[in-house]
């Protein structure tokens, strides 16, 4: 068994993983604080994926209608349509089977992961259907992502897209992506709207990031704020919100109690 092999070199703990209530076939385990699952079994359980092994590249390559996923053997970065996505932990190859860190891969695929305790199965919940969004949604989301985070990694661009959609879901902000992008209730919320760069043609990576976010990919949980500390003090955000994580040049924050107001 894969976990038995791993125990010879590092501590590993077996656990049960379910996908939409059904137990995931194959062995899952925790190593160095990261939950690993067999890639093929995870993709099959989520549905719609076809996976093959590229011997020359030493990578598992999976295809779906949304994007192509490439998982290099023992690499920390996955590739979505060729764009690097930092999974935070390396994939593993044991007995000719590719194992991947569960949470980042599930999140990239639009699923959510819930861990309660070691005696309870780790639950993966998929969206359960096709995403419901319009061409206008994709148009404006890809443009604000591109304008706000051009040059950032795919992970960083996904995070910016998540912030926009989290605002759409909040009762404190407008109900559509376009309205959130151009929201000026307290002040213009996004600098690219003020300087006009939001109207520029988005990069291919930004379009991919927008499509993934609209299909459920989430990398910054419920964060609704971000800023670049090299360009702004972000004083109100720092004083009134909870820091979540830094990705590239942006810091991301969760909301606390008060509604957002821009610095004066």
Image (spheres, rainbow, N blue to C red):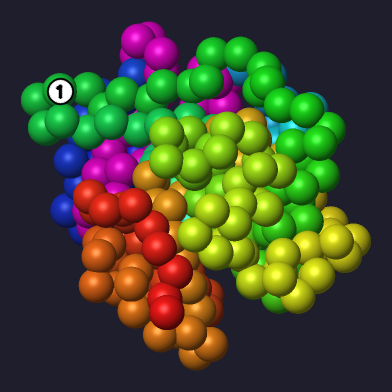
How packed is label 1: few (under 14 Cα within 10 Å), some, or many (20 or more)? Answer: few
Q: From the top left corner, tell me how far across and down residue 256 is, in percent.
A: 24, 53
Magenta stretch encompasses residue 26: yes
Q: Which residue is mark 1?
A: 120
Q: Quadrant of residue 143?
A: bottom right
Q: Secondary structure at mark 1?
A: loop
**In what quadrant of the picture does the C terminus appear?**
bottom left
* Camera-nearest residue between 157 and 66: 157
Tell me if residue 15 comes above or below residue 206 in the rendering: above
Q: What's the residue at 23%, 50% (across, down)? A: 257
Judge whether residue 83 can be spotted in this image.
no
Judge whether residue 22 can be spotted in this image.
yes
| Range of residues picked out in magenta | 19-46
Quick one: which residue is furthest to the bottom in this view?
Answer: 230
* Camera-nearest residue between 77 and 251: 251
Tell me if residue 2 comes above or below residue 224 in the rendering: above
Q: From the top left corner, tell me how far across and down residue 242 is, in percent.
A: 25, 61
Q: What's the residue at 59%, 57% (across, down)? A: 184
**In what quadrant of the picture does the N terminus appear?**
top left
**How many marks on residues?**
1
* Camera-nearest residue between 261 and 154: 261
Q: From the top left corner, tell me how far across and down residue 174 is, in percent.
A: 56, 38
Q: Quadrant of residue 68?
A: top right
Magenta stretch encompasses residue 48: no
């Amino acid at each position: 068994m894969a976990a038995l092999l791993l125990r010879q070199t590092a501590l590993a703990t077996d656990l049960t993983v379910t996908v939409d209530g059904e137990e995931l076939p194959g062995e899952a385990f925790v190593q160095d604080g990261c939950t690993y699952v067999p890639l093929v079994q995870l993709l099959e359980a989520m549905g719609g994926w076809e996976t093959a092994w590229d011997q020359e590249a030493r990578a598992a390559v999976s295809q779906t209608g949304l994007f192509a996923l490439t998982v290099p053997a023992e690499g920390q970065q996955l590739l979505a349509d060729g764009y690097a996505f930092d999974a935070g932990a390396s994939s593993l190859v044991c007995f000719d089977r590719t194992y991947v860190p569960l949470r980042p891969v599930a999140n990239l695929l639009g699923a959510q992961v819930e861990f309660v305790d070691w005696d309870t199965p780790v639950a993966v919940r998929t969206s359960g259907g096709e995403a419901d969004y319009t061409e206008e949604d994709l148009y404006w989301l890809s443009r604000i992502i591109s304008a706000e985070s051009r040059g950032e990694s795919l992970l960083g661009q996904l995070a910016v897209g998540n912030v926009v959609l989290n605002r759409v879901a909040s009762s404190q902000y407008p109900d559509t992506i376009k309205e959130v992008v151009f929201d000026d209730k307290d002040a213009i919320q996004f600098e690219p709207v003020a300087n006009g760069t939001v109207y520029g043609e988005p990069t291919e990576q930004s379009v991919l990031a927008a499509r993934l976010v609209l299909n459920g990919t989430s990398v910054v949980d419920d964060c609704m704020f971000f800023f670049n500390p090299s360009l702004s003090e972000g004083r109100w955000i720092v004083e009134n919100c909870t820091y979540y994580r830094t990705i590239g040049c942006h810091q991301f924050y969760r909301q606390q109690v008060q509604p957002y107001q821009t610095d004066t």
